[in-house]
Amino acid sequence: MTDATFRPATPDDLTTVTELVVAAHLPPWGIDEHLHNFVVAEQDGRIVGCGGFEAYPAGGVALVRSMAVDESLRGSGLGTQILQWVMERAAAERLTEFYLFTVDAHDFYLRFDFVDTTLDEIPEAAHESTQYKFLAEHGKDWPQIVAMKKV
C-alpha cells in the first residue's frame, strides 16, 4: 500500500482531478456536478489519485466513476483504497447498488465482486447519468466499454 492520505475533494481540486482523469483516458463529463462525492489521494503535497460516485438515491444506486491513479503509482494498492472509500461513502448514503463503466480496468473490478452487465440492466434511476446517456446513444460505436455491477 502507498503512504497517500485521503480526503474529500473540494472545488479547488477540480482542475487537478480533471487532469488526472483525462490522463487516465477517462471522460471528465460531469465531474464538477459530482465533485462533492469524490475523494482525492495526496502524496508529497500533490494529488496522485481520485475517484467518486454519482448518487441516484431514488433507486439506491451509485455509479462509480472517474477512478484514476497517477501512472507511477498504478499497482501500488492506491486504486483499491480509493474504491473502498468511494463504496463506503456511497453506502453511508444508503446507496446499495453499485454500477460502473470501464474500458481497461475490467480485471481490477472483478476482484471486488463486480460482474459484467448490460445497459438494459442499469436501473432507471441512473439513466440521468451523462455517461449512461452517451452509451445508450453511442454504445454500439464503443464496444470496448463494459458495464459492470457489484453482486
Image: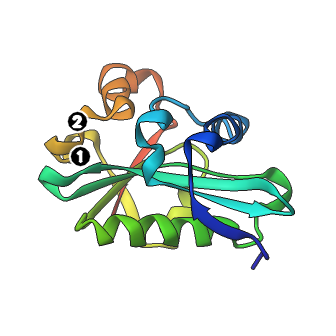
Q: Position of residue 13 (x, y in %)?
A: 64, 43
Q: Residues within 10 Å of mark 1 (few under 14, many from 20)?
A: many
From the image, state whether disc 1 or disc 2 is nearer to you: 2
Front residue of 29/6: it is 6
**Image quadrant where residue 99 sits:** bottom left
Q: Are marks 1 and 2 in contact (CB under 8 Å)?
A: yes
Q: Is residue 1 left or right of residue 37?
A: right
Under circle 1, the secondary element is loop
- Residue 124 relative to residue 105: left or right: left
Where residue 39 sits in the image (x, y, percent)?
Answer: 55, 58
User: Dot 2: what SS?
Assistant: helix
Please state the total of marks drawn on the protein image.
2
The residue positioned farthest toward the bottom in the image shown:
1
Q: Nearer the viewer, residue 30 or 149?
A: 30
Image quadrant holding the N terminus, namely bottom right
Decide which of 54, 149 is in the foreground and name it: 54
Which labelled disc corresponds to residue 122?
1
**At 46% from the left edge and 32% from the top edge, which residue is drawn?**
143
48 to 31, vertically: above or below:
below
Which residue bears the numbered disc 2? Answer: 127
Residue 61 at least partly seen: yes
Q: Is residue 144 left or right of residue 40?
A: left
Residue drawn at (31%, 55%) of the image: 62
Residue type of the residue flagged with mark 1: Ile
